[in-house]
């Protein structure tokens, strides 16, 4: 298996532009997570899906952020409009939920820089 | 809300020694606790999971303990090697599918 795939790996954009990050989870996994990592705040959960349904989006910073999972093999995280404070590494992770367990497999991340 | 505390200062040890990292949490005891390793420029990689009814879990040179009275988990790497140098993250279950991560502790193993 190729693992969790994220694209792009790096994104540099200007303030106000729309940014779309993409994720392909591991085949057979039914939970998908979007995280943001910065030096100041560490690894923060933004939103997670189970069976393609958003379960908890309480970590999404504000209305400028939105996430979708149209099918089991694809998810997007969109920022519109982007701001310099959104600069961070964004990780997607997937898991196969078993009771009492939640080992997550992380993608390589997308490093976002908003100028 | 649940908070996780990991030593923000880097841990420097000599090759061959045992590294011990600490994870403390503040509120309710989670059903399970996980440890991940993260290398620069990469995503975290799962290492071990320990459940609330387990005191200790081992995997090769790794050992994790879980003390619900102290609200603490210890992560040990025995016979450490320079290749063990990385950031180690503690993660707690908060119910359902959700886990929260600590800020991580950087480990440097010197040859």
Image (cartoon, coloured by chain):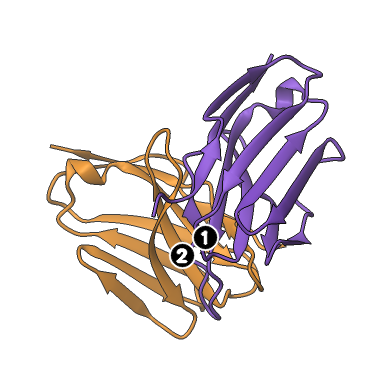
Chain colours: A purple, B orange
SS at circle 2 = strand
Q: Quadrant of the C terminus of chain A?
A: top right
Q: Is residue B14 left or right of residue B70?
A: left
Q: Is residue A6 visible in this depiction of the protein? A: yes
Q: Residue at x 19, y 41 (%)?
A: B82
Residue sitting nearer the eye, B16 or A94: A94
Q: Quadrant of residue A79?
A: top right
Are the residues at dot 2 and dot 1 in contact (C-beta closer than 8 Å)?
Answer: yes
SS at circle 1 = strand
Q: Residue at x 41, y 83 (%)?
A: B54
Determine if marks 2 and 1 fall on one subunit. Answer: yes
The chain carrying label 2 is: B
Q: Residue at x 62, y 39 (%)?
A: A22
Q: Is residue A31 left or right of residue B64?
A: right
Residue sitting nearer the eye, A31 or B97: A31
Q: Position of residue B107 (x, y in %)?
A: 32, 43
Residue farthest bottom in this picture: B53
Q: Quadrant of the N terminus of chain A?
A: bottom left
Above or below residue A7? Residue B72 is: below
Q: Which mark is residue B6?
A: none
Q: Position of residue A76 (x, y in %)?
A: 69, 43
Q: Residue at x 79, y 43 (%)?
A: A66
Q: Is residue A60 visible in this depiction of the protein? A: no
Q: Compute the Cα span from label 2 to label 1.
A: 5 Å
Above or below residue B15? Residue A51 is: below
In the picture of the structure, the residue carrying the numbered disc 2 is B34
Above or below residue B17? Residue A18 is: above
Q: Position of residue B15 (x, y in %)?
A: 14, 45
Q: Would you call the spot at circle 1 few (<14 residues within 10 Å), some (14-19), or many (20 or more)?
A: many
In the picture of the structure, the residue carrying the numbered disc 1 is B91
Q: Would you call the spot at circle 2 few (<14 residues within 10 Å), some (14-19), or many (20 or more)?
A: many
């Amino acid at each position: 298996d190729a693992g969790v795939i994220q694209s792009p790996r790096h994104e540099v954009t200007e303030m106000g532009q729309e940014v779309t990050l993409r994720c392909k989870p591991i085949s057979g996994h039914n939970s998908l997570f979007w995280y943001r990592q910065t030096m100041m705040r560490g690894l923060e959960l933004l939103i997670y899906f189970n069976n393609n349904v958003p379960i908890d989006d309480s970590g999404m910073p504000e209305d400028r952020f939105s996430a979708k999972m149209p099918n089991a093999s694809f998810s997007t995280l969109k920022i519109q409009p982007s701001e310099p404070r959104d600069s961070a590494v964004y990780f997607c992770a997937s898991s196969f939920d078993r009771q009492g367990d939640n080992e997550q497999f992380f993608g390589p991340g997308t490093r976002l820089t908003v100028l | 809300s649940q908070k996780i505390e990991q030593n923000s200062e880097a841990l420097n040890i000599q090759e061959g020694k045992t590294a011990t990292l600490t994870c403390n949490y503040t509120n309710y005891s989670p059903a399970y606790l996980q440890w991940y390793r993260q290398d620069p420029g990469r995503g975290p990689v799962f290492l071990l999971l320990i459940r609330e009814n387990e005191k200790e879990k081992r995997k090769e040179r790794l050992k994790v303990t879980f003390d619900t009275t102290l609200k603490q988990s210890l992560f040990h790497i025995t016979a450490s090697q320079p290749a063990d140098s990385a950031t180690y993250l503690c993660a707690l279950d908060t119910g359902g599918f959700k886990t929260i991560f600590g800020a991580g502790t950087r480990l440097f193993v010197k040859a």
